[in-house]
Amino acid sequence: MLSSLINAFKVPELRKKILFTLAILALYRVGAYLPVPGVPWQEFSQLFASQNADGGVGGVSMSMLDLFSGGALSNFSVFSLGIMPYITASIIMQLMQGVIPAVGRWAKEGETGRRRITQITRYMTLVLGLINAIGYLLLFQSDAYGVKFSTEVPIQLTSVVIVFTLVAGTAFIMWMGELITQRGVGNGMSLIIFISIVSRVPQAIWSSINLNGVTGLGIAITVLILIVVLACIPAIIFVERAQRRIPVNYAKRVQGRRMMGGQNTYIPLKVNAAGVIPIIFASCLIYFPAQLAALFNVDWLNTFANWVSTGPLNWILTLILIVFFAYFYTSMVFNPEETADNIRKQGGFIPGIRPGKATTDYIKNVLKRITLPGGLFIAAIAVVPSILFYFTGNQLIQAFGGTSILIMIGVALDTMTKVESQLKMHNYDGFFK
């Protein structure tokens, strides 16, 4: 691992990409502590902590939103809205591709269509960010939090500045994520979520040690949790990299004076082809009621947001949504008809399966069979820690919960894979031996 990191910095192009990515992520963390103008951030931070500790308005759901924003929400910083508006907009556009034929055609038009979808996603992100910003402003001004803003300028002007700053912060996060994707290493949005979760781990460890007021017991519980987490990592990596390989044979054919084909290969179908996307999408949908509760601040909506954010309803919804998005996203990124057609055009066939429709149906059936256990596995990893946190209240379990750890491992593996491909191009050994 250390030698691979050293090799990565030996490649000038890759070194620039890594340093650029780290610089953008550091800038993001600075923004998470930069307070919005006119907000008494120290007073607000104390009120936010007390409300969540007492189970106040959307307490549990607001804690999870704060986790995904890397603590920016509890600081009422310029990045308080986090990456959630962009992820929500992306989910909507993904769903629209399967519902609205025009959007589906855009996705198949190559770079032009993808550019159009990206542009609409950006506009939708700003609209959702504006709605969230107004919601947070109304919520934090309500009696539940009772935050008093600066009176040196008219309150109306202060409100406009706060909303504008929050929306601008969301746009800036979206821009930084796209910059990382284009000029850095890995997927920018995923890395921003990754760094947000990781940044909360030290505080969660300290909270876990002092949870019961007995330092020795707290240390023992914290060490036990970390051991369990470390033990789960190899199993998660095993499933993330597991494949079902479908053999493909190619018949020999003569092209000019050359003999073509005749070799045997395979189609690698990943058990978890969707990666970490189902977890991210499911989390955004589950905590969307919390965003609505922040906007309207209605008692029944706050209660519903807490029900959805924790407890049996949360566990059931998480399981269903993760499995659904595992199938949905896999169908978006892998096309059995196109794969079967390419095999047929190149003179290939799956042993024992007729080319054409039979090959398509066979690939679909294999994909369905392997996606279900993959989806159930990541759903179980996400739900079990949530159940433990529900009964213990240990913040380390929340910070290192199934959703968090799956996102961290998934993003880390994806980033390492992309660095690996760069190293292979320059004849260096990568991370995976």
Image (cartoon, rainbow, N blue to C red):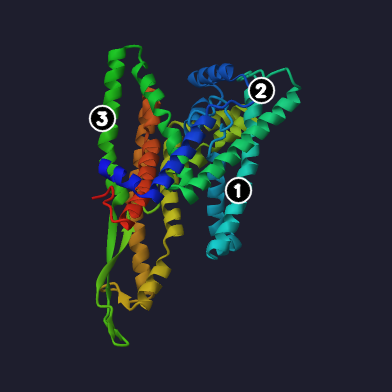
| Residue 122 disc label | 1
Q: Nearer the viewer, residue 408 or 111?
A: 111
| Marks 1/2: CA–CA distance | 28 Å
**Residue at the disc numbered 3:** 227
| Marks 1/3: CA–CA distance | 41 Å
Question: Disc 1 on helix, strand or loop?
Answer: helix
Can residue 308 be seen? no
Which of the two discs, 1 and 2, labels the residue nearer the N terminus? 2
Using the image, determine if residue 165 lies above or below residue 249: above
What residue occupies the far bottom of the structure in this picture?
Answer: 256
Which of the two discs, 1 and 3, labels the residue nearer the N terminus? 1
**Crowding at label 3, few (<14), some or many (≥20) Cα neighbours within 10 Å?**
few
**Crowding at label 2, few (<14), some or many (≥20) Cα neighbours within 10 Å?**
some
Q: Which residue type carries mark 3?
A: Ile
Q: Position of residue 98 (x, y in %)?
A: 53, 58
Which of the two discs, 3 and 2, labels the residue nearer the N terminus? 2
**Residue at the disc numbered 2:** 38
